[in-house]
Image: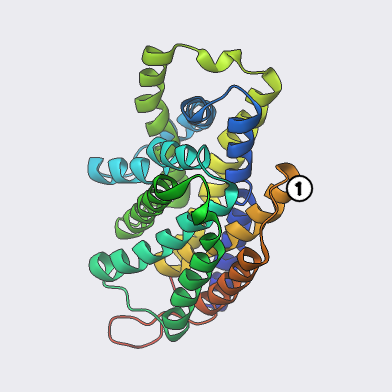
Amino acid sequence: MLDERLAGIGYGLLAVLIWGGFPVVTRFGLTHSSLDTYDIAFIRFSVSGLLLLPVLVRRGLGGTGILSVILMTGGVGAPYVLVVGAALSRAPVGYFALTPGSMIAFTSLLGAAVLKDRLSRGQRWGVPLVLGGMGVAASTALSGAGGPAALALFVLGGLLWAVYNITTRRWAIDAFRATAIVSVGSALVYGPIYLWTRGVSFAHAPLSAIAVQALYQGVFVAIGGLYFYSKAVSILGATTGSTFAALAPLLATVEAALVLGERPPALTLAGIAVVSAGMIGCVSTRRPDRSGAALPAR
């Protein structure tokens, strides 16, 4: 239905508005304070896990199996933050375009293999356009100091993100429960490991730096952004929902220029424009069902 589809698009845009600042806030914490990737991951999931624990206790897992819990938590939980954080410690925010780009590619491939999704006409030209734009946007960064290591980490982050998309769709896990599972699961598993190996090393950072990461990472990104994104995926489908992430580099580029002083070259800006055009194509048509008839995205 049209109203449902518009709601899905609205959720996707809200998620992008929040997630566009994730690489900027993360890199700012890494370069302007004594926090490192492990500290930021601990702060993020300590806050979000504590806030969402009562929700998970009240609502329960809802029949969600251990495999799906592991896949979701690994997909956008602590492993994802550690991988992308490590990449951002090696390279400027311009590289981050590789993560949503590879995520869209992996989601499309896994969606076809696992969910038997068939791409709509708009998705068939939109997804390649998104990927091409991502490649152009990131091409100037690939010659920088980050090099192949940063490239591999950003692409790995995209793969983990795609696993989350497919898992929530495959087992029809509602957005709020999925958000709570990821945050609480990461806090319960990663939190003790961090405290055992590093103690409270994050406490040596300025209180203002800790507060920024706690508020933005722990509340806005881990809870608000993931909830809105999960709603978009549940309504529009894994492939279409994932393409909203293509707008994140646009916002991240603008914010990086304002906050970090990183000035993207013209080629990067051109690539982001191509990405935006591809995203519009992906969400402008309905995806077909397995028989080829067009159905509203669920």
Whether residue 264 is visible, yes or no, is yes
The front one of 33 and 105 is: 33
Residue 146: percent from the left, percent from the top? 48, 45
Q: Name the amino acid type tagged 1.
A: Leu
In the drawing, does residue 89 fall left or right of residue 66? right
**In the picture, which quadrant includes the C terminus?**
bottom left
Residue 104: percent from the left, percent from the top? 42, 64
The front one of 182 and 123 is: 123
In the drawing, does residue 33 fall left or right of residue 240? right
**Residue drawn at (73%, 43%), measured in percent from left and top?**
259
Residue 138: percent from the left, percent from the top? 53, 60
The front one of 20 and 116 is: 20
Residue 105: percent from the left, percent from the top? 38, 66
Residue beneath label 1, please?
258
In the drawing, does residue 86 fall left or right of residue 279? left
Count of all numbered marks drawn on residues in the image:
1
Pointer 1 local density, CA inside 10 Å: few below 14, some 14–19, many at least 20: few
Q: Quadrant of residue 29?
A: top right
- Dot 1: what SS? helix
266 lies above or below 188: below
